[in-house]
Image (tube, rainbow, N blue to C red):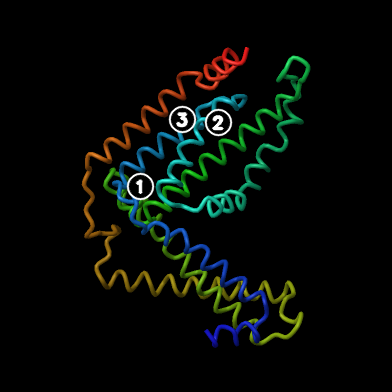
Amino acid sequence: MIFNKAIKGVLPEGIMTFDEKYYNIGFIDQLSYKDTFVHRLDPRAKLIATLFFLFTVVSFSKYEIAALLPFFLYPMLLMTIGEIPFMFIFRKVIMVSPFAIFIGIFNPLLDSAQVAVFPELTISAGWISFLSILIKFTLTVSTALLLIATTSFPNVCHGLRQLGLPSLFVSQLSFLYRYIFVLMEETMRIVRARNMRSYGERGKGIRIFVRIVGTLFIRTVERAERIYFAMLSRGFQGDMPSLKRFHIATGDIVFALSVGVFLYVFRLYPATQILGRFVQGVFS
C-alpha cells in the first residue's frame, strides 16, 4: 500500500491511467466467475440463445424502432440475474458506439423521405433508420458482452468447439483473447520505462510514440515465436484440449426454450402495437 502511494507520487499520471485501463479490461473476466443461475448455465445453451437473439434483432427492417424495444428485456434480465453492473456494460457500449454512429450518421442525408410520426409531426426517414441502427447496435453489443461476462471467454471457445466449429477458428479466437492481455502487459512495461526516463512534457512527442509502436511490434513478434515454439515442444497440433466437460441439464433446456419463445412472440407478433391499443382503450 505504501509502495503504491510512493509510485503514484513519483510516476506521471498517465502511467496510472494506463494501468487502470488494463485492469478494467480484465474486470469482465472476473465477472464471469461469479456463481449465479446464469453463470451456471451450459455455455452451449447461452451461445445458441445469444446467436438466435442477434439474428432476430438484425432481421428487423431499418424503419422498425418500436418493435425493437421489447428486446431490451433480455439483456436487462441477464444483468439482473447475473449480477452484472449496468454501468460497466453501459460504458463498454458507449466506448465502441462511434463505429455505429459513423455507419448511420449519413442516413438523414441519403434518405430524405418524410415520415409522419404524429398527425402534425413529420421527420426524415433517415433519422428513423439511424436510430434503428443505434438500437440494434446497443442490443447486439450488450448481449455479446453479457455472454462473455456470464460465461468466460475460454468457456465460450470450448462451447463453440463442442458445437462443431472448426478447431482452427476456435484456437485463433482463443489466442486472440488470451494474448490481448500479454500485449497489454508488454505495452505497460514500455510505457513505464518511457515515463521513468522522461520529465515533464519530454517523451510525449510523435517521434517517441512511433518508437514505442515499433518496439512493441518487434517484441510482439519475438514473443509470438517463443510461444509458438514452446507450444510445439509440448505437442500442440492445432487444437486446444480441455479437461472440462459440459452437460446439458434441465435448467439449460428451459432457458433455451424460454428465450426461443420470447424471440418468437416479439418477432412475429406486433407486441408494442397490441400494448399501445390496450393502453389507449383503457384511458379512452
Residue 3: image x %, image y %? Answer: 54, 87
Disc 1 crowd rating (10 Å Cα; few below 14, some 14-19, many 20+) is many
Question: Is the residue 116 above or below the residue 221 in the image?
Answer: above
Q: Which mark is residue 69?
A: 2
| Residue 107 occupies quadrant | top right
- The disc, 3 or 1, on the residue closer to the chain's N-terminal end is 1
Q: Amino acid at mark 1?
A: Val
Looking at the rendered structure, the secondary structure element under dot 2 is helix
Q: Which residue is mark 1?
A: 38
Q: Amino acid at mark 3?
A: Thr
Looking at the rendered structure, the secondary structure element under dot 3 is helix
Residue sitting nearer the eye, 90 or 174: 90
- The disc, 3 or 2, on the residue closer to the chain's N-terminal end is 3
Check whether the beta carbons of the residues at disc 2 and disc 1 lie within 8 A of each other.
Answer: no
Residue sitting nearer the eye, 39 or 238: 39
Measure the C-alpha gap from mark 3 to mark 1: 21 Å
User: In the rendered view, does 116 fall on the left or right side of 171?
Assistant: right
Outermost residue toward the front? Answer: 283
Q: Which residue is mark 3?
A: 56
| Residue 101 occupies quadrant | top right
Instruction: Please give the name of the residue rendered at 46% of the width and 30% of the height, measured from the top-left corner.
Output: 56
Residue 181: image x %, image y %? Answer: 47, 67
Residue 151: image x %, image y %? Answer: 37, 52
Looking at the rendered structure, the secondary structure element under dot 1 is helix
Q: Which mark is residue 230?
A: none
Residue 165: image x %, image y %? Answer: 32, 45
Rendered-image quadrant of the C terminus: top right
Measure the C-alpha gap from mark 3 to mark 2: 13 Å
Measure the C-alpha gap from mark 2 to mark 1: 23 Å
